[in-house]
Image (cartoon, rainbow, N blue to C red):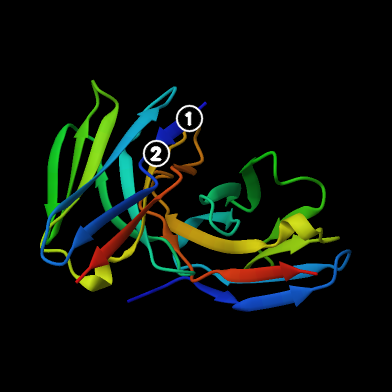
């Protein structure tokens, strides 16, 4: 089966950089995705890594190392609005594309 | 920008009642999903739907659950006899058609409260 581990909570101050790690165990691998979820809201797609390395999208970057079954989401120049839950997710290797989510990391940004 | 929509935003029901949660996926998307999230927990897969049939369902998706695409736009999740433990946020998602591994777009969710 598939399982993902990420820290439950992270706290940082406005303007800082924070890294949210994710390790995964999968029977097949079709990429690691990151989603942001504000309280009670829909998961919003942030990034996707299928190959090793760093993908940058504005203030957010995501990294993948397939040999280590590890990835992280890097948030730079933190803003108060970045306070949310962040989920890493992998695709199930079956042919349906279903996402398997981690437990989520609650990021609290303080002034 | 196209988006997935869901109605109602909040549904309160009595245990044992039937509920239907509605979703309008992004038009021209061909892969449809329902996920649920119990308060404070992770998002869990319920069911995937492609080519007018269920392609996969989870252990949670028992005989009390069903999905339908009654027309070209709506995608519904029915719970026949709700239980207290069905209280959760239910998210619909869809992705474009050339691969099941395309990005999934999530709707805003329906908060189901079973009393």
Query: What residue is disc 2 on?
Result: A90
Kindly indicate the quadrant of the structure image that contains residue B32. bottom right
Query: What residue is disc 1 on?
Result: A2
Which residue is at 56% across, 48% downward? B44
Which residue is at 30% across, 62% downward? A108
Residue B73 visible within the image: no
Q: Chain of mark 1?
A: A
Indicate which disc residue B51 carries: none
A16 relative to A69 in the view: left or right: left
Q: Chain of mark 2?
A: A
Secondary element type, mark 1? loop
Q: Position of residue B67 (x, y in %)?
A: 70, 57
Secondary element type, mark 2? strand
Against B115, residue A70 (above or below) is above
Q: Residues within 10 Å of mark 2 (few under 14, many from 20)?
A: many
CB of mark 1 within 8 Å of CB of mark 2? yes
């Amino acid at each position: 089966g598939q399982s993902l581990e990420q820290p439950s909570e992270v706290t940082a101050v406005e303007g800082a950089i924070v890294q949210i790690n994710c390790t995964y165990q999968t029977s097949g691998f079709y990429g690691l995705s990151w989603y942001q979820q504000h309280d009670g809201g829909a998961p919003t797609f942030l990034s996707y890594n299928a190959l090793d390395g760093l993908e940058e999208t504005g203030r957010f970057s995501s990294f993948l190392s397939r040999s280590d079954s590890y990835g992280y989401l890097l948030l730079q120049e933190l803003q108060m609005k970045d306070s949310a839950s962040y989920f890493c997710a992998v695709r199930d290797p079956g042919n349906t594309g279903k996402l398997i989510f981690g437990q989520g990391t609650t990021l609290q940004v303080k002034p | 920008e196209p988006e997935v929509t869901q109605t109602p935003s909040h549904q309160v029901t009595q245990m044992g009642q039937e509920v239907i949660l509605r979703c309008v996926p992004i038009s021209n998307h061909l892969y449809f999903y329902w996920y649920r999230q119990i308060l404070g927990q992770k998002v869990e897969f319920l069911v995937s739907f492609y080519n007018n049939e269920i392609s996969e369902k989870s252990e949670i998706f028992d005989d009390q659950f069903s999905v339908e695409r009654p027309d070209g736009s709506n995608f519904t999740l029915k719970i026949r006899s709700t239980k207290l433990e069905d209280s959760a946020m239910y998210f619909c998602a869809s992705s474009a058609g050339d691969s099941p591994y395309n990005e999934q777009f999530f709707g805003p969710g329906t908060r189901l409260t079973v009393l």
